[in-house]
Amino acid sequence: RGEGECFRRAHGADLRLCVLQYKIGQLYMISKHSHEQSDRGEGVEVVQNEPFEDPNHGNGQFTEKRVYLNSKLPSWARAVVPKIFYVTEKAWNYYPYTITDEHLGPEYTCSFLPKFSIHIETKYEDNKGSNDSIFDSEAKDLEREVCFIDIACDEIPERYYKESEDPKHFKSEKTGRGQLREGWRDSHQPIMCSYKLVTVKFEVWGLQTRVEQFVHKVVRDILLIGHRQAFAWVDEWYDMTMDEVREFERATQEATNQKIGVFPPVISISSIPLLPSSVRSAPSSAPSTPLSSDAPEFLSVPKDRPRKKSAPETLTLPDPEKNTTLNLPGVPSSDRPCRPKSE
């Protein structure tokens, strides 16, 4: 691969769930994951979260987040970016299809800032990763690597390991799923796969390959740990309705913004009209629907914690020494049908 060409990698992660169940699970996981890895001025700040309509994909949800993560970067990366910066993440969720775009945006204008972007397309299907052509319409004839992720057997860094989130040890009380063993993908039902096509672009000669490979490794680690957590948290979200998980999402986002030192923003999740189908991006300002004032107990923030006028978000893995956690899925319940939750 020559300089100037972007680096694409396709990831496939199997889960002990079906696609309809995971519509609830992925919303729960993303919210809790973001909260647990946010702290001390760095984390995931939610800027917008609102309904969106696309002429091709139909109704969905648009989110814009700012991920502040300077201290999490390796020293060679910190040398080429400003001390204070954030990654802007915009995502269009038309479950079971989502699009995520991320670009680096400094808090202050810096003429030397490298051009950096991540584009992620995600599709969920009820299979064990057997659809080799799932992204042919988006990236046909484009060179890409393929990476399969096994949430039970792939190794994770020791510092991020938690026995309670290990699919080989966890067993769900509500679904009977868990304690996965090698080869589980060939013997368990239901099973689904999260397919992701990740394109990383960093147009700086001499650093391009190093940065792009580093980003792909971070993305893979986040997917592995996140899916392990989603599986291990299945009993927490399995009985939720769509309205309940949206309320959890709203309360968690508010608490997360406070945790990293951001005053609660105005976030609308389900109470504003859909945008015109001709509009491709979110409006420039957030709507004025207030958030719920009652957050779950584990989301409470000390009242005496100092706050900053602005604060960061995080694309990074949590620090296990601070007892943080991540997200994703569970083992089959043979006597329980796989059916969608009411919205």
Image (cartoon, rainbow, N blue to C red):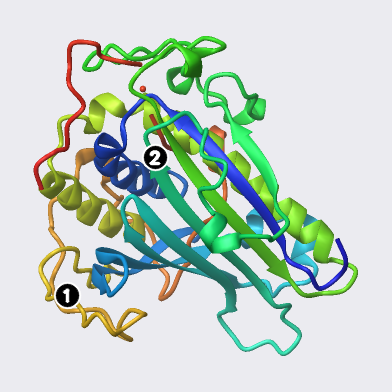
Q: Total of numbered circles in the picture?
A: 2
Q: Position of residue 143 (x, y in %)?
A: 73, 56
Callout 2 crowding tier (Cα within 10 Å): few <14, some 14–19, many ≥20: many
Callout 1 crowding tier (Cα within 10 Å): few <14, some 14–19, many ≥20: some
Q: Quadrant of residue 209?
A: bottom right
Is 119 in front, or is 57? 57
- In the picture provided, is 226 more to the left or to the right than 150? left
Q: Earlier in the sequence, mark 2 or mark 1?
A: 2
Q: Which residue is mark 1?
A: 274
Residue 40 visible in this rendered orientation of the protein: no
Vertically, is 132 above or below 8?
above
Is 174 in front, or is 31? 174
- In the picture provided, is 197 more to the left or to the right than 19? right
Vertically, is 259 above or below 3?
above
Disc 2 to disc 1, C-alpha distance: 27 Å
Q: Amino acid at mark 1?
A: Leu
- Disc marking residue 125: 2
* Residue ID at (67%, 42%): 146
Q: Position of residue 151 (x, y in %)?
A: 52, 26
> For numbered disc 1, what is the local secondary structure?
loop
